Each structure stands twice: as structure tokens, then as C-alpha cells.
Image (tube, grey):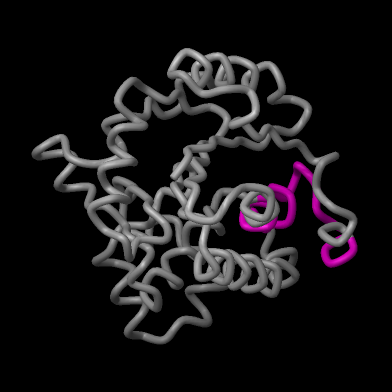
């Protein structure tokens, strides 16, 4: 089980991506374990399916994220672990040990993600508010969103299928989101929340356990450290 790390940056974030890369190097990652993506590295298929994808709409309302993550999983060995951080976030000492221990302890985890510090409903898009059942709307008030800016993924057939589902659901809704033009919602997070209700192998860590006892992935990430 080998650890890899990755990030995605449009042109205006290249300098920030370089800072994050240096942080990963300081933690002991080798260059061949680092996968730095940009829009030019997205495959033609991505833009064929959503030609309007651009920085303005977060490259297809965040559809880029599961798309490029799966492409990296296809390049690394089975059972290897891929760490994704939003390009503004700084990885901290102890990250690797925590991930190794967590995935060794629970062989059923495919995706590990911390929760946000706010309920889903706070950033739920109008599209979801109009289309979710009343049960899921109530649940979105009680449960916190997965923090899709920090993901750890075990390379397995099941994780690839989950990423496929995440991508195509996001892509399906992206065409509708063009009508709403809601740039402040976190479409990747609310879609991942729905998938976490179906697949127990998506482990969403508790915000409260982190806040009260300092437990979880958040302890090893300095969010927004590199924001310009």
C-alpha cells in the first residue's frame, strides 16, 4: 500500500500549487508519487460531454474532480492510496501515519473525508432543494457536508465505480445548474453527501469529534493556508 498525492489548479493557481507541492515534498513524498493536474490535462472526453466547462463554472460544476481522480487511480497500483487536497490547503506532519493507520484498521473504507463545519442545507443548491425528497432535505439539515476539498481514496474497483457515479451524477445535474448559475454552492460536496448515504464505504468523519477531541483527518490539514 503506497501513498500518492494530487491536486488540480487552473492557470491562476499555478503558483499556489507549487507551494503545496513543496509541502508534500517536505513530508517525504517523491515526485513520482505526486500527480499535479491542470485543465490542459483533462481528457478530450471531459470537454466533449460538457463543452461549457471552464474556470467560471468550476470546470463543469466540479465535475472535473471525480473525473481526474479516477484517471489517476487508473495509473497507480491496486490498493494504493490517493490523497487529494484543494490546491490552497497545506498538508501537515503526521498525515501519512494517520492515513496508514486508518486504512489498515478498516479494510472496508474506500473513501475517507472529513465533514465540514456546517450543515448541508447551508450551501445546498436550489436545484437540490427543488428535487430532493422531504426526507433528504430534513437529513441535510441534520448532517454536515463531506469536505470534498480533502479526500483519501483507496484504489479499488468499488472506489472507481463510486467516482464514476459521482462524476456522472454531477455531470447530469451540471447542465441544469447552468440555468441557476449558483456559483457559491459546493456541488461536489452535496453530491458526495448523497452518495455517502448509499455507500457505507464512504466514511465521513465527524466535525464534532474533531472539534471536541481533535480526532480526524482535519488535524493534519491546514485549510486555506495558501490562498492568495
Name the one closer to the observer, 63 or 152.
Answer: 152
Residue lying at 27% horizontally and 47% vertically, measured from the top left: 102
Residue lying at 61% horizontally and 35% vertically, measured from the top left: 7
Q: Is residue 107 visible?
A: yes
Vertical relation: 95 (above or below) 50: above
Residue 51 lies, in percent from the top left, at: 88, 59
Question: Quadrant location of residue 37?
Answer: top right
Quadrant of the drawing holding the C terminus = top right
Left or right, 131 with respect to 194, comes to right
Residue 162 lies, in percent from the top left, at: 53, 69
Name the one closer to the observer, 202 or 63.
Answer: 202
Residue lying at 27% horizontally and 52% vertically, measured from the top left: 205
Vertical relation: 25 (above or below) 61: above
Residue 226 painted magenta? no
Residue 150 lies, in percent from the top left, at: 45, 42
Residue 57 painted magenta? yes
Question: Quadrant location of residue 92?
Answer: top left
Q: What segment is highlighted magenta in the picture?
A: 48-68
Vertical relation: 40 (above or below) 200: above
Left or right, 18 with respect to 214, comes to right
Q: Is residue 182 visible?
A: no
Residue lying at 62% horizontally and 47% vertically, measured from the top left: 76
Name the one closer to the observer, 59 or 5.
Answer: 5
Question: Quadrant location of residue 45?
Answer: bottom right
Quadrant of the drawing holding the N terminus = top left
Left or right, 115 with respect to 207, comes to right
Amino acid at each position: 500500500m503506497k501513498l500518492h498525492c494530487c491536486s488540480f489548479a487552473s492557470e491562476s493557481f499555478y503558483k499556489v500549487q507549487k507551494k503545496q507541492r513543496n509541502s508534500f515534498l517536505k513530508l517525504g513524498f517523491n515526485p513520482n508519487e505526486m500527480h499535479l493536474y491542470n485543465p490542459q490535462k483533462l481528457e478530450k472526453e471531459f470537454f466533449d460531454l460538457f463543452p461549457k466547462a471552464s474556470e467560471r463554472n468550476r470546470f463543469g460544476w466540479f465535475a472535473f474532480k471525480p473525473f481526474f481522480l479516477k484517471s489517476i487511480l487508473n495509473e497507480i497500483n491496486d490498493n494504493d492510496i490517493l490523497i487529494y487536497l484543494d490546491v490552497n490547503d497545506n498538508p501537515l506532519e503526521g498525515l501519512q501515519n494517520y492515513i496508514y493507520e486508518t486504512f489498515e484498521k478498516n479494510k472496508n473504507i474506500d473513501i475517507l473525508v472529513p465533514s465540514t463545519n456546517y450543515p448541508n442545507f447551508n450551501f445546498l443548491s436550489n436545484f437540490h432543494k427543488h428535487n430532493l425528497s422531504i426526507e433528504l432535505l430534513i437529513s441535510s439539515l441534520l448532517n454536515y457536508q463531506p469536505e470534498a476539498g480533502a479526500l483519501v481514496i483507496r484504489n479499488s474497483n468499488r472506489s472507481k465505480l463510486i467516482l464514476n457515479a459521482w462524476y456522472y451524477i454531477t455531470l447530469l445535474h451540471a447542465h441544469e445548474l447552468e440555468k441557476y448559475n449558483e456559483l457559491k454552492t459546493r456541488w461536489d460536496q452535496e453530491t458526495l453527501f448523497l452518495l455517502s448515504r448509499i455507500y457505507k464505504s464512504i466514511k465521513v468523519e465527524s466535525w464534532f469529534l474533531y472539534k471536541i477531541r481533535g480526532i480526524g483527518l482535519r488535524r493534519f490539514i491546514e485549510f486555506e493556508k495558501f490562498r492568495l
